[in-house]
Image (cartoon, rainbow, N blue to C red):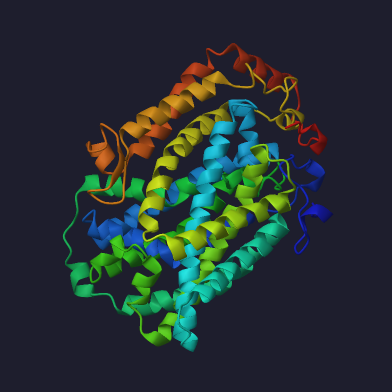
Amino acid sequence: MAASENDRVGSVETRGIEPVPDTERHGHASQMFWTWFAANISILGLPLGAALVSFRGLNIWQAAVVAVLGSFGSFALVGALSIAGKRGGAPALTLSRAVFGVRGNAGPTLVTWMSRLGWETINTTTAAFALLALLDAAFGIRRNTVLTVVCLLVFIGCTLLISGLGHATIMWINRWASYVFGLLNLVVIGFLATTVDWGKVFHAPVGPVSSMVVGVGMIAAGTGIGWANTGADYARYLPRRIPGGRLVAASAFGAGIPLVVLISLGSLLAAGEPGLASASDPVSAINTMLPSWMSIPYLIAAFGGLLLSNHLSVYSAGLTMITLGIRVRRTLAVGLDVVVTFAGGIYFILIAKDFYGPFITFLTLLAVPINAWVGVFAVDLILRRSYDGAALMDVGRSSRYWFRGGVAWTAMTAWAAAIVVGLLFTEASTSATDVWFSGPFAHSWIGSNGLGWVVTLLLAAAVYALLRRLDGTVREEAAGQRAQQPVPSAPAARETS
């Protein structure tokens, strides 16, 4: 089916969060391959692999197995959750109204929006550092305040251009930019491979199996889990007839291929450069391992990889902002988003003395409720037959997703319970002496090995699956699904708040 005027490359996408009707659905499952390939070709995957060797004591073969399981497995989950987008034609957090209620959904939506803004700020500041280093290496231009602001604006401008144009342009950019920046990454990877201390690599002892289990969780948490609540945003224009299994496979292979290569290389490099795993600025840490002539293609690749990841995040954040109830056009939502990240970049580069430690600590805490949302939403997706497009856009008492007082208390209870338990296993700190929060089980085997997110996700899923059967309002809504054919679209006018 041909693309509509609303979703053409180079044209501004005017659709907001309202479901896409069947007459405007188009594309193939391969789009999900390029979406996640583009988001994961950044050199920043190297420190993850280095951590498997430096912190977990794995050898290269074990690290490669862990990379495959963690990367492919976590993005298979992203692909599975993106089936909701194909089925309902709306962004993930908009579809979440059907699970949490039109008012109850505000909690998960707010957390998701804050997390997106946080990671975008990290991408923006890191990209600015990369561009500053590139100007120094290529032209000898030293960093100063004005140049720093200009570099931030360049990255923000590129992000705004791509994200502002919308879905079709993002899909097109992802595919063709993947070739360009993927090739640059291969050049850098090829050179870095020549610096590996192969003697240390092949004589490294075998690590414990328990470390492999923990490593899989670490890779999953650092890659696919962070994107799990955005997959539907990019699948919503796909025709319903596309098998869900193809979306799962395309997502898993699209992200898994570059991640396995980069994580495995990071594991190799850690044999001779163990500090790579703990570098606060991994772009600069890797740059110091390269001769000056190789720095230029490396820094271009780093900048491009961050841009490809960031425009996806900004696009989703704009949709999430609208879902939250901020009544603006999608393009304005994207603009507001990048203004916030620009301000954050100015603060963290020019004012704050320490950036990465405190900010990533804050985002670690936000990851707990996001994982709880994934568990609840995944169970609902398995049991749900359809979404009511009109009800998704109606946030008043007449909505089918009003439940009790606008809240699906079954989902909210499961979400809240999983958050509380997840925090018990969580420690948020910038150093051993600067601990922001430490749960009573943070130093248990599960907590100290970073598996609290697994407990959070599984508990949310189990509690919701159990309580769902007891909630009369949920049973009534499910009965309505059986009685009604899927309604793929709704007029934007039904959005009442």
Q: Where's residue 231, x and y in %?
A: 58, 46
| Near-viewer residue (463 or 119) | 119
Does residue 297 appear in this view? no
Q: In this view, does 66 lie to the left or right of 105?
A: left
Q: Where's residue 323, x and y in %?
A: 66, 38
Number of callouts: 0
| Near-viewer residue (312 or 145) | 145
Q: In this view, does 369 lie to the left or right of 433?
A: right
Q: In which quarter of the image is the C terminus?
A: top right
**Which picture quadrant has residue 288?**
bottom left
Which residue is rendered at x = 27% and y = 49% of the image?
212
**Which picture quadrant has residue 53?**
bottom left
| Near-viewer residue (252 or 235) | 235
Which residue is rendered at x = 45% and y = 38% of the image?
371
Q: Where's residue 179, x and y in %?
A: 57, 71
Q: Where's residue 300, x and y in %?
A: 51, 76
Which residue is rendered at x = 59% and y = 68% of the image?
153
| Near-viewer residue (52 or 325) | 325
Q: In this view, does 458 lie above or below 241?
A: above
Does residue 28 appear in this view? yes
Q: In this view, does 298 lie above or below 175?
A: below
Which residue is rendered at x = 75% and y = 20% of the image?
398
